Image: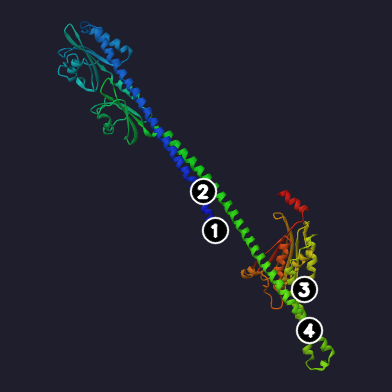
Amino acid sequence: MLPSPSLRKSIVGTVLLFSFVPLFLLGWVVYGMFASAYHAKVRDNLAIFAEDKRNAIDLFLRDQVAQLRVAAQSHSLAQLSSQEFMDRLLSIMQQGSQTIVDLGLIDDEGNHVVYSGPYNLRSINYKNEEWFKIVRVRKLYISDVFTGFRGFPHIIIAVSKQENGREWILRATINSEIFDSFVRLIQIGKKGDAYIINKKGELQTNPRFSGKDVQVIRPLIDSKFSGVRIHEGIMHDNAVYIAGIWLQEKEWLVVIEEDKHSELEPLLRTRTMTILVSAGGLLCILLGILVVSRMIVVHQERQEREQARLNEELVQSSKMAALGKLAAGVAHEVNNPLAVIREQAGWIRDLLEEEDIQSSPNFQELRDAVIKIEQHVERAGSVVHRMLGFARRMEPVRFDVSIPDLLRETVVFLQNEMHFRNIQLKWDIEEDLPLVETDPSQLQQVILNIVDNAIDAIGKDGTITLGAAYDAQSGCVCMHIRDDGPGMDKEIQARVFDPFFTTKQVGEGTGLGLSISYSIVTRLGGTIRFVSQPGEGTEFIICLPVRRGSKADDRHLGEK
């Protein structure tokens, strides 16, 4: 028999294995796919966002260049050489926005011929400046941020024009604050940032958060590339996505930082919710497994007890069948010699009565011996008769019987014995018990056997309780015969229904009473069992099915 704890552990372990592992793998795979898709979506959105913002900055710069070129192409050198005209032109350009801070006209010698703006730059010569040389070659120049003659960072745009064999340059300064604000509008979220750097890694706009680690951005600066590149890094102790895209109008890299935690917050919330839901599901599964395993174990234990009971009954039936055959043979072989002994003993006694042997001094001793022979022959004959009855397996004659009435009628035969031994008789019988269909004579024999054994077990000064009750679960009326005698130990209990087993003194019992009782109750379709504890007494329970059609039987069937 598998121990219940082991069976339960095996069931729980097996079901958990086949429930948790697939669930865990499913959750892990689904979350992994979802996380991968979410990361890809975040990166795609960031790439699209960076490309849009790159186009906006390029458009901004193109607008400034176009505005400056239109001014250069639309006006002659003579017009632009007029201070008044230059002031009016700057005023017109600033009506739309304050993007351009100043305008200046520079001749081919680098002299600042005309200047309109807030700074004193009119007498400066740019002939040796690097940007002056470049613009004369490329006709267009957009500078990096530099301090120049005015002493603070700024960006200039310059275009050159040929007119009547003379070359001149129209230069404008971009408002750095407006340009910085325009770039910072790109930032995403509370911790996001956006800024522009050149190929040397120098900031061209002021970022939202200072202290940028150029080494983190270095992989994006080392070589110019097309499209958007995104990599992950740590900036200001925060994990960030870093998107980089090069401008088309200038070799500047637009850098957009996006806080990774903020972007992945919905994913993290989903992961937390998934873990909680999974934990709840696993808890429900665990509780269900424990409940089901408990039910299985209880059912298994009940089945095993029932199987053990059936096995015991089978063994007992086998014993009884073998005993029946043995009893028939023994009774046949013993009965005839007993008849001869009885007849010869009677003949000897007749001779003792009739002959002159009465005058013998040993007459009385001979007479007592003959009487003892007759008594023991009678006793042996009784045993043989009971064995024959047992061996014949007489079919019961069934009548409708009231168990309480049968108990009261039967116990009358033993009341004198109980009174003599000062044994009290108590009754515990339910009212309105249904009738049972059984053989009252054989059942009386069972009751007498058990009550007689109870009297012998108590000896003197005890109590015997006779009870009867209806067991709705089995549909039987059960008799209870309980004594407060010494009880039985395990060894005696194991043999109590064995034929010829008795604990009584030699000559006081045959050891067949309980075996015959077991056989009778079984033939009557009932069950007999006992409960005994050493020092606490013994109780026999005999259950017989109620008569079909009785009220209790109808009630029992209705309950089913």
Residue 15 - label: 2
Residue 179 place in picture, x, y as percent: 30, 21
Q: Is residue 149 left or right of residue 505?
A: left
| Nearest-to-viewer mark from 3 and 1 | 1
Residue 351 place in picture, x, y as percent: 82, 88
Q: Earlier in the sequence, mark 3 or mark 4?
A: 4
| Nearest-to-viewer mark from 3 and 4 | 4
Mark 3 in CB contact with mark 2 (< 8 angstroms): no
Q: Is residue 245 left or right of residue 149?
A: right
Q: Mark 3 to mark 2: distance in Å?
A: 63 Å
Residue toward you, 333 or 156: 333
Packing grade of label 1 (10 A; few <14, some 14-19, many >=20) is few
The quadrant the N terminus occupies is bottom right
What's the residue at 17%, 6% (across, down)? 164
Residue 344 - label: 4
* Quarter of the figure with residue 301: bottom right
What's the residue at 35%, 22% (across, down)? 52
| Residue topped by disc 3 | 417
Q: Is residue 320 above or below residue 108?
A: below
